[in-house]
Amino acid sequence: MTPHPTTDPLGLLEPSLVPGDDGFGPSPSTDERRSRRWRGLLVWSATSAPVALLLMAGIAFGPRGINLLSSATLPLLDPVVPVALAALGVLVGLGVGDRREDDRRVFGAACLVAAVTVLVVSAGFAVVPLAAMSSIPRPFWILILTGGICAATSLTLPSDDSLEPRSAATRVIEAGVLLPIVAGGLMLAWLRAGSFVGASVLVAHACGVTLALAAAAWLLLTTVSTETEERVFAVSALLLIGGVAAALSLSALFGGLGAGLLWRYAGRRPRETIRRDVLFVQHPLLVLVLLVAGARADLSSLALALGLGYVVLRVAAQLAAGQVAGRVVGATRDLGVHLLPPGAFGVGFALNANSVVGTDTSMLLAAVVVGTIGSELVAVLLPPRSAGE
């Protein structure tokens, strides 16, 4: 393992941001780093995808573009979206807890950033109903809380290997989706049940069914003898978990997270089998989610204004919270700037909320899509500094 630079004891900087990238050359200039960020908008890897490009492609292919994803076609894709979101939640659950000494500090920093972002974006969105009472759908709190939860994530895809060395910034980003996923799951349950007690009962029932399905899949995977059977059972488990969330009108990300946590601490063979098979389909499912989200975005003038406000509030919250969270993990260099790329989980949750709530959140979905594209562009314009600066 390559040792971290003395100026970055926790590995806060990504490997591409370490001086000279090879540890010996001069620090890259700001223009060079910005150029890499622009190229990064088109790059595919195990943990990244061209989120902004895929959202814009969805808008172009949708009913307001060339109509390839028409209003008649999109409902046919709706049953697959919860499965895709459940798979993303499973990946997050499988990556939880790599048993490092500073896990608590990283998790605390991640929760701090997520909480500050939710509060700042929600507070900003709370002003909108007062300024445009006739244009904002009711109930207002759906728009306010969902906008904050969507803005609080910066993850596109978790690392495919929990044992590989990762920078503190990457670990904060990965841990930062946990609080928004849980908060989003509880919010959708409350909306579905109409009361706190009803939401608690609904979440308990959903968790029980999901964990029972996950446990059944784990037992089956311990008995199979061929790779084909393993893949069939793993994919079937994802279909069932996503189907349960869709049937109960709950968060598929939350259901997938619960199943992933169970498999994370189960036997090694089922865990590795599920990880392998989910990783095999993660990029196609992510593409599906982003294209559908872009196609469903109704880009009105108000949605564009909300999207612009989303970008400003999110960037301000991430930069401010990153400064404080950097002190928690023991390094302060540009953590907030590393958090600026919005990833895909916020868009996924907005799409999930839109399918559960309906037209009341269609404007929010459009605002999150616009805000995600805008946040990606801001992240390109504000690259992290090198260690030599």
Image: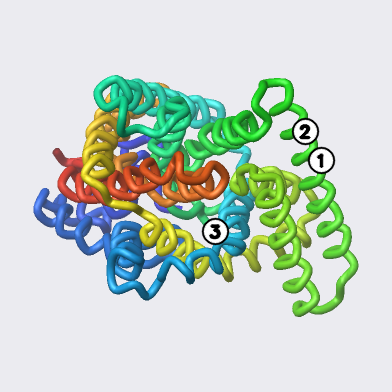
* 153 or 100, nearer to the observer: 153
Disc nearer the start of the sequence (3/2): 3
Q: Residue at x 42, y 56 (%)?
A: 293
Query: Is 275 placed above or below 305 here?
Result: below
> How far is disc 1 from disc 3 in space, using C-alphas?
27 Å
Q: Is the C-beta separation of discs 1 and 3 under 8 Å?
A: no
Q: Which mark is residue 208?
A: 1
Category of crowding for the residue at label 1, using alpha-carbon neighbours closer than 10 angstroms: few (below 14), some (14–19), many (at least 20): few
Name the residue at 36% across, 43% down: 363
Give the number of callouts: 3
Dot 2, crowdedness within 10 Å: few (<14), some or many (≥20)? few
Residue type at the position of mark 3 = Asp
Taking depth in this image into account, of 163 and 78 the one nearest to the observer is 78
Q: Residue at x 48, y 71 (%)?
A: 73
Q: Taking the image as drawn, is residue 39 in sight?
A: yes
Examine the rendering and report whether any part of residue 95 can be seen: no
State the mark number for residue 204.
2
Looking at the image, do the residues carrying marks 3 and 2 touch, with CB atoms under 8 Å apart? no
- Quote the CA–CA distance across marks 1 and 2: 6 Å
Against 1, residue 273 (above or below) is: below
* Residues marked 1 and 2 touching at CB (< 8 Å): yes
- Indicate which label's residue lies in the foreground, 3 or 2: 2
Residue under pointer 3:
160
